[in-house]
Amino acid sequence: MKLTWKLAVSACAIAVALSGCERQEDEAATGDEVHAAEQFIPMLVYRSGPYAPNGIPVANGFHDYFTLVNERDGGVNGVKITFEECETGYATDRGVECYERLKGKGPTGATVVNPFSTGVTFALTEKVTTDKIPLMTMGYGRSESRDGTVFPWNFPLLGTYWTAADILVQHVGNLSGGLNKLKGKKIALVYHDSPYGKEPIPLLEKRAQMHGFELLKIPVTHPGVEQKAAWLQVRQNQPDYVFLWGWGVMNSTAIKEAAAVRYPREKMFGVWWAGAEQDVEPAGDKAKGYNSLALQHSAGKYAVHADILEYVYGKGKGVGPEEGVGDVLYNRGLMNALLVVESIRTAQGKFGKKSLTGEQVRWGVENLDITEQDIKKLGLEGMMQPVKVSCRDHEGSRRARIHQWNGSEWKFVSDWIEADDALLRSMVDEAATNYAKEKGIERVSCEA
């Protein structure tokens, strides 16, 4: 069954876990042949440990898209993508170790790093500045790092956690009849007690002050399998809405515990890392009605997936099960890889169709401009929204929708919601300025 596979670690994944690090993924980069033009991508993954059920499909989507670009297109304008996985287990220290081990590989060193962990992102923020490697954190990481004048190497593309929290507040405000109707209501944040889970708190506190709702902050200890005390607080306080900021087994456990205390799943709203099949299927019927943000995409197959099935799985080069192609987290990994590829392509327009340095690719990320026409050509029409990055805006897009689990699939239940950028920008400016003062950083001149 589909669910059984998702909760198991494949033989390939076991091999990775046992070897610890350094598995070469691209056949084109193995053996004695050395390519004159290739672009190396380190892949920090977690195919083992308590977060493996969520980490595996993200890694699979990432892997398959790079393989697609090589098999269908011959690379990015003839430059082959080579990549290597290193197992982090979602641990910050192991993530940093993987980064250090892989950053110097390839003809020009690492092109870009995607840590898939807010904790690792915090740990690498100063390192990548020294090493001149762009840090791409699609939908996670430091919220203030969208300010490229202070964080020139960080790129929280498509949405930060402040963006996510703001969209959720707007949504429940709409459900209540307007933001002014939130006065006197209670919103509980059940969150992973880590840098990731704490990221939305400043925005939620700001919104609570603005609109007069009470914010209940309920932490859950890693990995999140024990939550009875947290949901006892929910039962006692009876919040009007619950925001779930979980990852891995914490999410399905939270849904089960909500059912146990009879909290309506229709009033639960997860961040986009708490809204995949792995989060609801283990809870069975108890998950019906549960909502979460969608980081632009939900589950589903589009034109790009047909190409993946033909050029990757049709050639026996798919890393995961074919039935997982198009699931929420698989699509998340695919979009991450696409943003890496298009950043390289953008940089090639300035520096040439050759192996590029991390510094050159950083220019490509900062000048990334994916239009609706581009999205159609890439085979993601209906799945992805345009993104335009700039020196001052390393996020590039602040739109999301809500999807709801109906017991068998995800369905969108809202239109696109745009975060309040005036509010976010003021918070980002303040936090980035404080960070710059603390670290003795001089702001980058965008004009220069």
Image: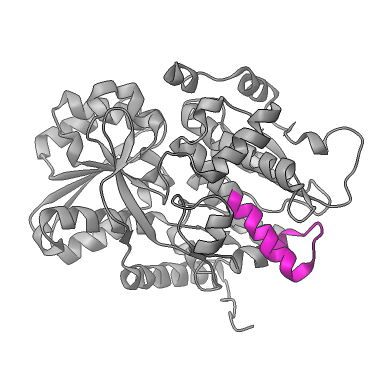
343 drawn magenta = yes
Q: x and y percent of residue 177 in the render?
A: 10, 58
**Residue depicted at 88% across the width and 32% down the height:** 31
Q: Is residue 430 above or below residue 75?
A: below
Q: 423 or 122: which is nearer to us? A: 423
**Where is the N terminus found, in terms of image quarters?**
top left
**Residue depicted at 20% across the width and 30% down the height:** 258
**Where is the C terminus found, in terms of image quarters?**
bottom right
**Residue depicted at 42% across the width and 39% down the height:** 299
Q: Magenta stretch mostly in which secondary structure?
A: helix
Q: 25 or 384: which is nearer to us? A: 384
- How is the rendered protein coloured? one colour
Q: x and y percent of residue 67 in the render?
A: 69, 39
Position of 354 compared to 393: left or right?
right
Q: Is residue 248 above or below residue 338?
A: above
Q: 290 or 137: which is nearer to us? A: 290
**Residue at far bottom of view:** 447
Quarter of the rendering containing residue 353: bottom right
**Residue depicted at 51% across the width and 50% down the height:** 380
Q: x and y percent of residue 159 in the render?
A: 43, 57
Q: Which residues are magenta?
A: 338-362
Is residue 388 in view? yes
Q: Is residue 256 above or below residue 423?
A: above
Q: 436 or 178: which is nearer to us? A: 178
447 drawn magenta = no
Is residue 120 in view? no
Position of 184 compared to 447: left or right?
left
Quarter of the rendering containing residue 16: top right
Q: x and y percent of residue 54 in the render?
A: 47, 32
